[in-house]
Every structure is written in structure tokens, then in C-alpha cells.
Image (spheres, helix red, strand yellow):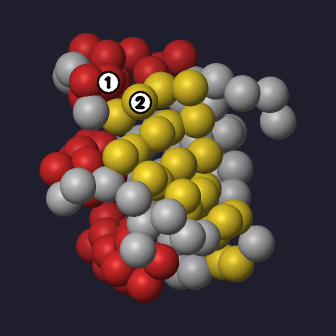
Amino acid sequence: MQALGVLEVYETGELTVVGFGGREILDFISVAECRDELQELIREQQCRTLAIDLTGVKIVPSGLLGLMASVHHSGVEVHLYNACDAVREVIEITNLDRVLHLHDIDV
């Protein structure tokens, strides 16, 4: 596992897996810094699928959800894993579940 400024990187390549280290609230993160890290990872690793581990995350700022959607619109498939009920509900209400694929797995 490699820690960047905001993200923890678990796997790289065409399938890149990142997470937030189990932090509960992501309000404090810099969306711009997260965007820069994701863009660099996607470019350097020629990422086609981005898996984001949301285990333990209770609150995701709207700017970060927008960033995830923009990653999808840039041609990268985005999968979100282990979103809590509150985060899942926001994603579904905003219809982002049409572009951000939600999954639950045991960790």
C-alpha cells in the first residue's frame, strides 16, 4: 500500500484501487488535491477502471462525488466499494449510481 497526500493506493495498473484509510469524514480533504492525485494515477498507470474503497467513510463531500463522476466522464469506469447507507443514499438520490457502480464486499 502506498499513501499519497489524500489517497491510499492499494493496487495500480489498468485496475487501480484506492481508499481513504478508513477515515470516517472526508469533509476536511482537499478535493483539488484528490483530483490531482487521481489524474496522475490514471495517467501514469493507464487506468481503465478505478475502484474506490469507502470502508469506514460516513460523510463524502459533494465536491468529491462530482470528482468521481468527472473521472467516469473522462472514460474511466468507477466502482465504489462498501459505501455506508448514508453515502449510498446520497449517490442513489442524485442518480450518480448510473455512473458510479456500488458494491459491497467483506473486508
Q: Which corner quadrant holds the N terminus? A: bottom right
What kind of residue is marked 2? Answer: His
Which of the labelled discs sits on residue 97, or is there none? 1
Question: In the rendering, at what x and y percent does residue 8 appear?
Answer: 63, 68
- Residue of label 2: 101
Q: Which of 49/7 is in front?
A: 49
Residue placed at 27% from the left, 33% from the top?
A: 99
Q: Residue furthest right?
A: 107
What kind of residue is marked 1? Answer: Asp
In the visual, does 6 lie left or right of 99? right
Taking the image as drawn, is residue 67 in sight?
Answer: no
Q: Is residue 2 above or below residue 20?
A: below
Which of the labelled discs sits on residue 36, or is there none? none
Residue placed at 26% from the left, 49% from the top?
A: 72
Question: In the rendering, at what x and y percent does residue 47 appear?
Answer: 43, 66
Q: Is residue 83 above or below residue 53?
A: above
Within the image, what quadrant is residue 19 found in? bottom right
In the visual, does 77 lie left or right of 81? left
User: Are there few (<14), some (14-19), or many (20+) residues within 10 Å of tag 1?
Assistant: some
Q: Is residue 22 above or below residue 79?
A: below
Question: In the rendering, at what x and y percent does residue 92 appear?
Answer: 31, 17
Cβ–Cβ below 8 Å for labels 1 and 2? yes
Question: In the rendering, at what x and y percent does residue 60 appear?
Answer: 42, 42
